[in-house]
Amino acid sequence: MTPTDLNKLLRQFYAEVRGEDGRMYAKSTFVGLRSSIHRFLTSEPHCKTFNILNDKEFQPANQVFLGVLKRIKREGKDKSKPTPCISEGDLKKLYGSKVFEESNPLSLQRMVWFNTEFYFCRRGREGLQKLTKSSFVFLHDDLGREYCTLNFNESTKNHPGDLSGDFQGEKRMYADLDARNALCPVKCMKLLLSKLNPKCDSLWQRPLTQGKNCGFEDMPVWYANVPLGKNKLGSMMKEISIAAKLSRVYKNHSIRATTITALNEGGFESRTISSLSGHRCEASIRSYCRDSSLSQKRAMSDHLRRALDQNPRNESEMGPSTSSTPYSSSVRNGGTLSVKVNSIHDRNSSKNDMPTIFQKCNFNGQVNLYFPK
């Protein structure tokens, strides 16, 4: 089939495709259909050289595709949302709960799995079943710090193994600087490897239940000679979310989104993050960071609520202060915080008390104190 004939077929397909119930697909599903067709045509055994997403020959079909996307949104069927990051509060809850521990096989496996996804910025369940006991090696850098890294280059969605621009940087998971930390990611990885069943080569094995007459500390092997299936690995973050009673049920891909967002907020450049995430295009990094964080959402909502306050705490509207405290409410002007001292009975004692008005406050700018005559 020539590109011209395929373009005509795709135009008709995009305009008429419907679900089993006769309704239009959701936006994410509709976009996924086109991407699936593209991957099918460009992968083996077909290996087509044309690109139905970008080539000029397929522009008419893609115009129909974009038109259907707009229709989906107009009809209120666009319910797609970006993969949520794991909130800061939920991360603290995870590492402060018994869901992540080194004292039993299930919690140890969950913690090592999460660390592997987080530090290596892995994509969902991709390649998890292929990881074995020998997939990771432990080395030291030039400063003597120990780290864990993969001993081979994985075949991933963005790096399938072709020769064009398939460079992959080395990904490292460093040991905690505090050697006493029981939750050190490298230490936990070593513990997991030491407790795996010697008859099974898979890194992810089915955890054993506790013996009747002994605890896990007395058991040399914590896992059965059975590897975890792809569905079990694919729902790992869902099970962790439920077990830890997090604020929402997260998916595996939320860990990748959390890693990229945390590095972006930490000031790392897109090209540096791409070396860890494996993105070929730096613009893909920005797609993870377009949304505001939870703290920013709360701050914006609170600020808008204060904007509607019928009784704002503004000195010019409140008139003369009747407060019994020696300090009035603050007024912010042009980045400078001005604090008015309403009354002074003993100037020396006031100076000693002055620091109390700044307790538990952070300022980024100039602070002026002034006294009424």
Image (cartoon, helix red, strand yellow):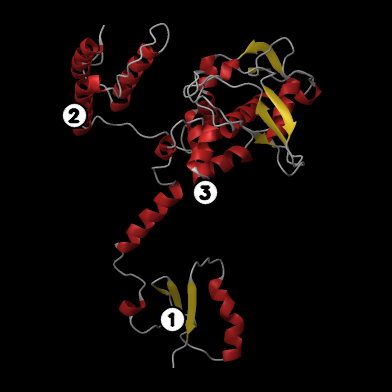
Crowd band around label 3 with a 10 angstrom C-alpha radius: few (<14), some (14–19), many (20+): few
Q: Is the C-beta separation of discs 2 and 3 under 8 Å?
A: no
Image x and y of residue 121, in percent: 54, 32
Tell me, for residue 224, which label it has, or none. Answer: none
Q: Earlier in the sequence, mark 2 or mark 3?
A: 2
Query: Distance between the Cα atoms at labels 1 and 3?
Result: 44 Å
In which image quadrant can residue 167 be found?
Answer: top right
Check disc 3 and give the amino acid type: Gly
Check disc 1 and give the amino acid type: Ser
* Mark 2 vs mark 1: in front: 2
Quadrant position of the C terminus in the picture: bottom left
Q: Earlier in the sequence, mark 1 or mark 3?
A: 3
In which image quadrant can residue 141 be found?
Answer: top right
Question: Which residue is the site of mark 2?
Answer: 71
Query: Distance between the Cα atoms at labels 2 and 1?
Result: 59 Å
Check disc 2 and give the amino acid type: Arg
Query: Distance between the Cα atoms at labels 2 and 3?
Result: 38 Å
Q: Secondary structure at mark 3?
A: loop
Tell me, for residue 323, which label it has, or none. Answer: 1
Q: Residue at x 62, y 83 (%)?
A: 352
Reply above or below: 190 against 350: above
Q: Residue at x 34, y 20 (%)?
A: 35
Q: Secondary structure at mark 1?
A: loop
Q: Is residue 46 visible?
A: yes
Q: Residue at x 36, y 84 (%)?
A: 320
